[in-house]
């Protein structure tokens, strides 16, 4: 029989299957797929595993996905007397309980940490993890009336809805709203100003803003409005890029522009500012009237093929940073790119560059 475990060894779910195979001393080959190895999007892989995730176990024509199912199957089929999955009903139930708890209870909260600690493919999954962290901070649950302010394409509103919330999104940009509405027809997206919300007092249980509050000219006004539209006990949560000292991807660019270009060349309006450290976020929340204020610095690694790819991602995916880069003279851009490439070398490993980034997730409760 040919036994193949499909999946990169850096995945925690693949590790479970590897560990079981090794523990049971079962012969197998492992083929690297997933993450930077790719191939999980191919028709061949999807035919084995329609989720496109890893691991997948293949034994001749038999295919099995879901890491816990794989571990149980291996014990059941090939080592029925192993202590790994004991036959005695109570002992087995205990193992099953912890395996299920890992998949359901534990996996979600450790997701943000996990994302920050292991290698992830350079396909922007980092942002989804931060969004998840925000929703955790806002404690979004089924039935929650959730408002996503400065919603952009509406990713947070949509994932709040996927968790059972009734979600609204608000943004001042009709172009962003067009994208959001095309993405998700189940969320109501409104055009409006975060500083003057077009909603009644106490209309929401949770208000979130993902990397939005610092684009508002007067963030404190927006937080006061969030306070007004929240009901008693309602929670606000927002994310914000960490200080460049922690947020190296940003620091590489800011330093390079300072050396070779002009940081003031940008035509975009000045940021609302005043956030960046956890203390500043907590002060702003308290000033807006919130209690039980918490802040948490989330660190992660942003992986790219090289510095050029990092710069391209920032140019395509940011607002003020992109405007600042666009405002540089063409010859300065070359020098800036060269400077970033040189300084990014210290973050190089076998797969490219792994640049530290950091964001603050802040939350507070209306009493
Ligand atoms: N519930 C699934 C989750 C599988 C999963 O999320 N796998 C991750 C790696 S830990 C994955 O495939 N990520 C995409 C990739 O590696 O390309 C299982 O336990 O097998």
Image (spheres, helix red, strand yellow):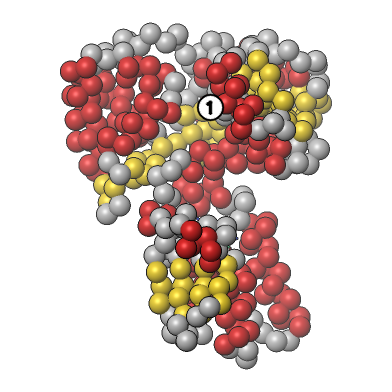
Secondary element type, mark 1: loop
Q: Is residue 12 above or below residue 203?
A: below
Q: Is residue 86 above or below residue 362?
A: below
User: Dot 1 corresponds to which residue?
Assistant: 211
Whether disc 1's CB lies below 8 Å from ligand 1 is answered no
The residue nearer to you, when weighing 13 against 177, is 177
The quarter holding residue 344 reads top left
**Residue under the image location 52 percent in, 73 percent down:** 57
> Residue 333 in the image: x percent, y percent?
23, 21
Q: Is residue 238 left or right of residue 251?
A: right
The residue nearer to you, when weighing 89 against 233, is 89
> Residue 360 in the image: x percent, y percent?
52, 33
Residue 87 visible in the displayed image: yes
Check the picture and name the quadrant holding the C terminus: top right
> Residue 238 in the image: x percent, y percent?
60, 29
The residue nearer to you, when weighing 227 against 263, is 263
**Residue under the image location 38 percent in, 53 percent down:** 36
Q: Is residue 194 left or right of residue 351?
A: right
């Amino acid at each position: 029989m040919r036994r193949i475990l499909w999946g990169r060894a850096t995945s925690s779910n693949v590790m479970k299957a590897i560990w079981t195979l090794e523990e049971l001393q079962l012969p197998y080959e492992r083929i690297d797929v997933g993450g930077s190895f790719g191939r999980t999007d191919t028709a061949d892989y999807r035919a084995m595993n329609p989720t496109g995730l890893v691991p997948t176990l293949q034994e001749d024509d038999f295919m099995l996905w879901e890491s816990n199912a794989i571990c149980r199957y291996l014990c059941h089929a090939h080592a029925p007397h192993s202590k790994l999955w004991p036959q005695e009903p109570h002992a087995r139930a205990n193992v099953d309980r912890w395996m299920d708890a890992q998949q359901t209870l534990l996996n979600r909260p450790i997701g943000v940490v996990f994302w920050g600690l292991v290698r992830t493919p350079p396909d922007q999954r980092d942002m989804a993890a931060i969004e998840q962290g925000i929703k955790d901070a806002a404690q979004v649950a089924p039935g929650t009336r959730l408002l996503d302010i400065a919603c952009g394409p509406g990713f947070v509103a949509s994932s709040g809805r996927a968790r059972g919330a009734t979600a609204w999104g608000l943004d001042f940009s009709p172009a962003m709203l067009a994208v959001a509405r095309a993405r998700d027809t189940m969320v109501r997206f409104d055009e409006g100003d975060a500083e003057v919300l077009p909603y009644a007092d106490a209309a929401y249980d949770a208000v979130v803003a993902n990397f939005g509050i610092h684009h508002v000219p007067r963030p404190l006004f927006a937080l006061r409005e969030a306070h007004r539209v929240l009901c008693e006990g309602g929670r606000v949560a927002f994310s914000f890029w960490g200080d460049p000292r922690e947020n190296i991807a940003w620091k590489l660019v800011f330093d390079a522009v300072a050396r070779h270009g002009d940081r003031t060349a940008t035509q975009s309006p000045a940021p609302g500012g005043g956030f960046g450290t956890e203390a500043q976020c907590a002060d702003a929340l308290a000033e807006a009237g919130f209690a039980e204020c918490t802040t948490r610095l989330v660190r992660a690694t942003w992986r790219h093929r090289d510095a050029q790819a990092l710069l391209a991602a920032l140019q395509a995916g940011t607002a003020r940073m992109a405007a600042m880069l666009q405002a540089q003279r063409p010859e300065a851009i070359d020098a800036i790119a060269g400077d970033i490439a040189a300084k990014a070398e210290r973050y190089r490993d076998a797969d490219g560059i792994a640049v530290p980034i950091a964001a603050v997730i802040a939350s507070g409760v209306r009493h």
